[in-house]
Amino acid sequence: MAGRVVLHGMWASPYSKRVELALKAKGIEYEFVEEDLTNKSEALLRFNPVHKKVPVLVHDGKPIAESLVIIEYIDETWKEGPPLLPQDPYERAKVRFWAGFLQQQLFEAVFSVIKTDGEAQAKAVKEVHEKLKVLEEGIKVHEEVLGMKFLDPEKYPRVTSWVKALTELPLVKEATPPSEKLVGLLQFLRARALESAAA
Amino acid sequence: MDGVKLHAFWASPFSARVIWALKIKGIPFEHIEEDLPNKSALLLQYNPVHKKIPVLVHGPRPVCESMVIVEYLEETWPQHPLLPTDPHKRAVARFWVKFIEDKSPNVWMVYRTVGEEQEKARRDSSEMLSILEEHGPNKGKKFFGGDSINIVDIAFGGVALWMGAMEEVSGCKMFDAAKLPRLNAWIANFKSSPVIAENLPDRGKLCDHLARLREKRLSSSTSK
């Protein structure tokens, strides 16, 4: 499939990483533009005027924003390479349902744990466990930053083994940013969030 | 072909979205009206994660989440398409559906809260509307889908057509028609489209229902 592919992203963004993984899984050649989120490029602001966020995929000059929307676009446009979604409409519905759940429910709860303290944090932690429980019946994130362990193989055997299988894939290993770098950034973001909450 | 059932609730904008998609595509279905304080055992079995309507059941298979259901209908019954064929245009449509899904909870929050929380939700709702007015893909067209209703129209319809009732019941204005001429015209076009007009709850009945729910919610939260 011809056409220039450019991805505006950021090394620590999980949303950006999703799109990178999709492109690499399909074997699509692309240029990566590392955005400084404190000093966004004029191109990014032009390509995503609504949210002004990464990731944005630009294919033949046409921009697409929202990581999961981009992934569906990649799957529909490059039919060679492994499918990113199943073919059957019912299986696709299940994937879309769980992707939505992961994003709206689990990710949001985990970010809350990072940004809060005390009672608010205890509440957020409880929520994360509830969401993980749900995931276990039908993610090794942020544990170092907080000194907390979420992915307990005894409590959540299936989720833990799924994350393990994912992170051991060569494709994913290569694309994962170094742990210390990510921990450093998250500690900075946490300190900033707590400071602005206390202000 | 397997039969289609929809577990729905008359006052819900989410089940309305699915009904609109089913009717536009001419898909026959059995409407199962749920009594929400007394959810049926079947509903809880089909949607154990959220325990909510709408749930579409196609043969033995349940599908949950209104916009996931609409995409499922689109892929299973391709007639009267709700998405364009061009991949980039599809991505733009899905972008706007996501935008509406992410921002519209602010509209429900205006209805569910008071004071400062409500004021913030009102500001965020107004911002959502301004962005849609300025950037929305319906410039110079009757609908977001052009001449016919598409998935973005369905997604936004579930929000826009409930906003008036929520404003009335909460006494809090979100939609400034003078500042939103394009969206205002869109609402008139959408509401008068036959499939939509025939599948909307009665406004008076809806306001009564929402007012009762709001009172119950607010009085139970203050009595803690």
Image: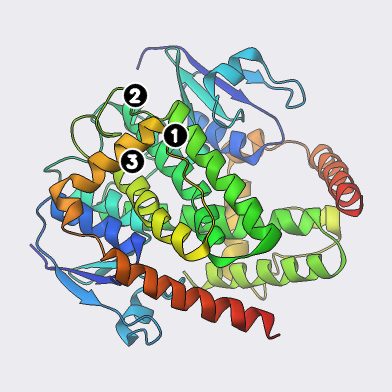
Label 2–label 1 contact, CB within 8 A: no
- The image position of residue A50, as x and y in percent, is 54, 30
Q: Which residue is mark 3?
A: B152
Please check whether the numbered discs 2 and 3 fall on a single chain: yes
Query: Residue at point 57% right, 60% down?
Result: A105
Query: Residue at point 18% right, 36% down?
Result: B148
Please check whether the numbered discs 2 and 1 fall on a single chain: yes
> Mark 3 is on which residue type?
Val
Q: Chain of mark 2?
A: B
Which type of secondary structure does the marked residue at label 1 adopt?
Answer: loop
Mark 3: few/some/many CA within 10 Å (<14, 14-19, 20+): many
Select label 2 or label 1 by which is in front.
1
Cα distance between the residues tagged 2 and 3 = 14 Å
Cα distance between the residues tagged 3 and 1 = 23 Å
- Identify the disc placed on residue B139: 2
Q: Earlier in the sequence, mark 2 or mark 3?
A: 2
B125 or A44, which is in the foreground?
B125
Cα distance between the residues tagged 2 and 1 = 17 Å
B146 or A42, which is in the foreground?
B146
Displayed quadrant of residue A192: top right
Select label 2 or label 3 by which is in front.
2
- Identify the disc placed on residue B178: 1
Please check whether the numbered discs 3 and 1 fall on a single chain: yes
Which type of secondary structure does the marked residue at label 3 adopt?
Answer: helix
- The image position of residue B190, as x and y in percent, is 25, 43
Mark 2: few/some/many CA within 10 Å (<14, 14-19, 20+): some
- The image position of residue A26, as x and y in percent, is 44, 30
